[in-house]
Each structure stands twice: as structure tokens, then as C-alpha cells.
Amino acid sequence: MLSLLFLLGCPVAMADPLTDPETSYYGASILEGDSEVMFDEVLNLDQELDPDTYAFFEGSTLYVGNSDDYGNSIDGIIEFFWFQSSIDRGSDFYVAVVKVRATPGNDCPWYLGGYECELWADDWQDWGEYPVVSVEAITDVSREQGAFRWDWAVPFENYGIDAYGQMSFSNQYGIGSSTQSGAEGSAMSAVSIPDGTNINGVPVQGGANVSADIQVKGYLGSEYKVQTQYDITLYEWDVYVNGRADLMAWDVFLNLGARSNQSAYHEFFLPLQVEFGQPFTMDEFNFLSTFDTGNINPFAHQLGFSVQNLTISAPFWEEPEEEEEEEEVVEPAIEPSSEPAGEINEPAEELEEESSEEDEPLRVDSQPVKSGCNAAPVFYDPFSIVTLLFLCLFRRQK
């Protein structure tokens, strides 16, 4: 069984990641609450409305949680991202960044062993194994409208770390790349590793600036990705992952009760895929924690809540058009004339009139051109005829 890396930290240190999440994203849009992400209601473990449960949006961040009369609480912060890269699969891709913390209270029954509650640890005082932090997402695939991409979840398989001391973690998920089409990947890494740490049962070198990969899968580009980084104090934990198209679940178990009175914190990445332009509905988003309410009480006390019918939709987005490069216009090196524009235009107008007159074709009368003999009748004077005959007779007599 893999001993997990999980965080047990002091109350102050554990509060920092929830109040100030260190999340950055590139090539992705964070979805707006109450418009692009909506839900119906939040219920307790008995599927009942409970005044101690809460779920509300503050901007783009969904705050959820529940508490009990002993002061135990489980709280979460959830943010949803839509990737603009959109791998060419006819789908929209989302990732939900889930940050969860379970905190034991200080008002347990004194007759059960003291006022201080604890996280449920696998030791002789606690009967049975129960998760100290559990996150479960459920969707109905019979609608054939969306599924969980369990293969890119963070973490996407069981893993473990045994360590004593402060440690930093980084979760990353990316999809799409300008250099590699269809690229997708996820990674979970540890930095600033304490000495004597084992990752998945293998000893690793410790140090302030030493890093090690816990889980790495696929290709992570720098253009389209979401990443988080958080500090935790780890002891012996086990994390089990169960992923299917309709279910994504993480269960974190505490194997050592040395610091069971501190908070437990972890972050998860939940990738989603749905047909392009269609909404994705998560029927149930369940959170659970288990507490020990007294040293002489061997029975587990569980606390949790369920967010019902959480629907995610893509934001309105248009791909930016590529701007065409403007050609540089080289102007002739001629000094501008100081004459008014009206005087300069007059000669041009005169030239235009002259050219229009020269270009105008010659106008020819519509009378037909006569060629050959003239067929019109000719009228002669009678006196001229008599004179002509007389001259002819006179020439013959000679």
C-alpha cells in the first residue's frame, strides 16, 4: 500500500492556502459564478438541508463547507477554468481546481476522553479505516453529454510520501500547444523536500531547493495551462484514486496519529470534457471528512456535504483576428507647395476639360455619302439646244 503524501499542518499554515489560493493560468478563462457556473443547492450527508452547510460564489470562486457542534469543519474552495486552446476534438475542455481542508474542533465531549477532537487515524484507538478527506464527483453519462477525463486528473493514480517537515507541492494541467497540436498533460511535483523523505516508497534526496516529480503524464506546454502551488506539512498518508467517465474520487487516509489534532489539506484537479457548445452537469459534488471525538470512543464521526446539480457552460469568446502588417508608404521627396489647394486644382480642371474636348469623337452629319453617277434629272434651256444645232450644221457646210 502506497503511503501518501498529504498534508498535516498547523492551523495558521493550513488557513493560508484557503484564504489566498496560489493559482495561475495561461490561455484559459476563469468562469464566472452564478452565470457560467451554477448549482441548485447544498445538502448534508443525510441529503437534507442543514443551516451549518454553505455554498456561495464570491466572484469566480465557489466557497463550500460544513461544520458540527463539536467545532469540526470541512471547507473547500473551487474554481473552474475553460481552455481557449480547444484541442480539435469537437469538445470543450474544463478543469476544476479543488482545494479542501478538514479541521478538528475543540469542543468534543469531555467524558469521551477530552475536549480536543482529532482527525481519524489508523491506530489502536480507532476502529476501521475512514478517509480524513474525501472528494467525489458524479455525472450521469447516460445523457451522453460530458465525462470526466480521469486520465489527466491530479492526482490520477494512487501515490504516497512519508515525510516529516514542511514541503511545497505544485499541481499542473495543460491542454493544447502552438508547437504540438493535441498536446495534453498533467503533473504533480514536490519541491523543498525534507531529508529522509520517501516518494512512492523510494527514498529521494532532500534539500531546500530540491524538487522531485510525484506524477507526470503527457506533455505540458507553457501556452495553455493551470497550475497551483501550496505548502503543507506531511506525515504518513495514503491517497487512493478512483476514476471513470461518470466518477472521479479521491480518498486520503491518515496512517499516523502523531499530529492528528492538526488540519489536513490537499488540492485536486478535475478535468472535464463535453461536446462543443454544450453545458456539463455534475449531478453531485460530494465532500467528506472523518473525526475522532474521544479517545475512549472507538466509533468514527463523519461530516460532509453535497453540492447538487452543478452546471458549467463555456463563456462567450471569439478568436482574435490576425492583424495584417501595414506596408510602409514612401513619399516622394518634394516639398509641399505653399499655394492654396483651390488655386492648385483650377489648372487641373482646365486640363481635364481640354482633354475631354480632344477626346470627343468628330460629329458627322447623318446624311449619307454619295458615290458613283448622279441619278438626279437635269433640265436644259431650249435656246441653248437651238444654238448648239446651228453650230453643228455650220461646221458641216464648211
Image (spheres, rainbow, N blue to C red):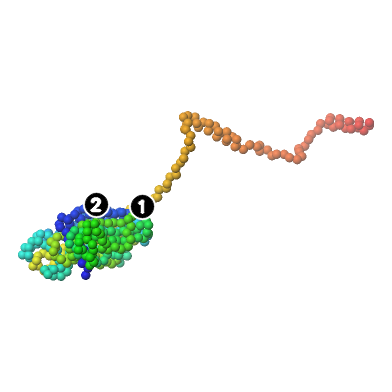
Question: How much space separates mark 2 and mark 1, taking CA atoms?
Answer: 23 Å
Which amino acid is tagged 1?
Glu
**Is label 1 in a helix, a strand or a loop?**
loop
Mark with earlier residue (2, 1):
2
Dots 2 and 1: beta carbons under 8 Å? Answer: no
**Where 396 falls versus 76 (above or below)?**
above
Q: Is residue 347 visible?
A: yes
Which amino acid is tagged 2?
Gly
x and y percentages locating residue 312 in the rendered image: 28, 58
> In the image, what residue occupies the spot 69% across and 39% down?
368
Q: Nearer the viewer, residue 111 or 160?
A: 160
> In the image, what residue occupies the spot 21% across and 63% down?
197
Question: What residue did someone put label 2 on?
Answer: 59
Q: In the image, is 76 to the left or to the right of 339? A: left
Outermost residue, left side: 111
Q: Nearer the viewer, residue 370 or 256?
A: 256
x and y percentages locating residue 279 in the rendered image: 31, 59
> In the image, what residue occupies the spot 68% across and 38% down?
367
x and y percentages locating residue 240 in the rendered image: 23, 67
Question: What residue did someone put label 1 on?
Answer: 318
> In the image, what residue occupies the spot 53% across and 33% down?
348
Determine which quarter of the picture holds residue 381.
top right
**Is label 2 in a helix, a strand or a loop?**
loop
x and y percentages locating residue 53 in the rendered image: 17, 59
Q: Residues within 10 Å of mark 1 (few under 14, many from 20)?
A: few
Q: Nearer the viewer, residue 61 or 27?
A: 27
Q: Which mark is residue 178?
A: none
Where the N terminus falls, by quadrant? bottom left
Q: Residues within 10 Å of mark 2 (few under 14, many from 20)?
A: few
Where the C terminus falls, by quadrant? top right
